[in-house]
Image: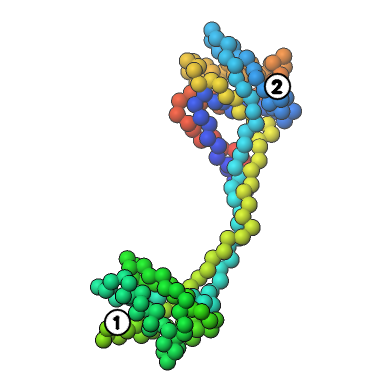
Amino acid sequence: MNSQVPYELKKGQALITFEEERVAQNVIRMGKHHVQIEDKVVEVVAQSVPLNLGAQFQVNILISKMKINVTRIPGGYPADQIRDKLELSFSKSRNGGGEVESVEYDSKAKSAVITFVEIGVADKILAMKDYPLYINENCFRVTVSPYIEKHLENFQIFSAVSVKTVLLTGMEDVEADEDTLTDLVYVHFQREKNGGGEVDVVKCCLGESLLVYFED
């Protein structure tokens, strides 16, 4: 099943698709064309149509051996105090903790990410599901869960050009309506003496930008 690739056609532009690739490429090679539009000769520029086919990437998901997530942290305490108490509580070896390298505390979410110095401490704590957090004389049970690390790899952007379609620019000041302009562009590029050939379809834009779709 073919996917559709969107392209934004802006004011003063037109897309013209020819039956044959060689005709489209010849029109592009010529560059500038002088098209009779009612009582004026308008210079338009022919160029290829760049298409963005999207991106492809690979996401690797790993469970950190050094970090853990902590949630259900009690509110009502200053952020600095919570960070200090988290570091102190999770460094207690008798509770399965170990030396803490850093504490990232989110007061709005009442959650934190704790990074340990040594590998293995996180696994021991995660086996408990919850952990005692001591604040002043109170002991709270906070929830611990794995910290997921995501790595974006092999990122590639795919692009292409439409080999039979040509982008025409330079018609911003044309006063004709779109139907009339479409007919005049069609007739001009249908003629071999103008470098054209058999035309399949013409789409013009004289107002707000619009999306047209190409099949991938």
Q: Can you give x and y, in whole percent of width and height, for residue 151 in the image? A: 57, 64
Mark 1 surroundings: few (<14), some (14-19) or many (≥20) residues within 10 A: some
Position of 55 relative to 67 (above/below) = above
Q: Which residue is mark 1?
A: 135
Q: Residue at x 52, y 68 (%)?
A: 149
User: Could you classify mark 2 by the number of other residues whose Cα lies within 10 Å: few (under 14), some (14-19), or many (20 or more)?
Assistant: few
Judge whether 45 appears above or below 151 on screen. above
Relative depth, front residue between 124 and 167: 124
Label of residue 171 in the image: none
Q: Which residue is mark 2?
A: 30
What residue is shown at x 34% (from left), y 79% (from top)?
85
Drawn side of residue 108 relative to residue 211, left or right = left
Indicate the position of residue 143 as horizontal and vertical percent values.
38, 79
Under circle 1, the secondary element is strand
- Residue 200 placed where, x, y %? 64, 27
Locate residue 106 relative to residue 212 in the image: left or right.
left
Q: Is residue 89 above or below residue 12?
A: below
Q: Amino acid at mark 2?
A: Met
Q: Residue furthest right?
A: 22
Of circles 1 and 2, which is in front?
1
Residue 88 in the image: x percent, y percent?
A: 38, 82
Nearer-the-camera pick, 128 or 37: 128
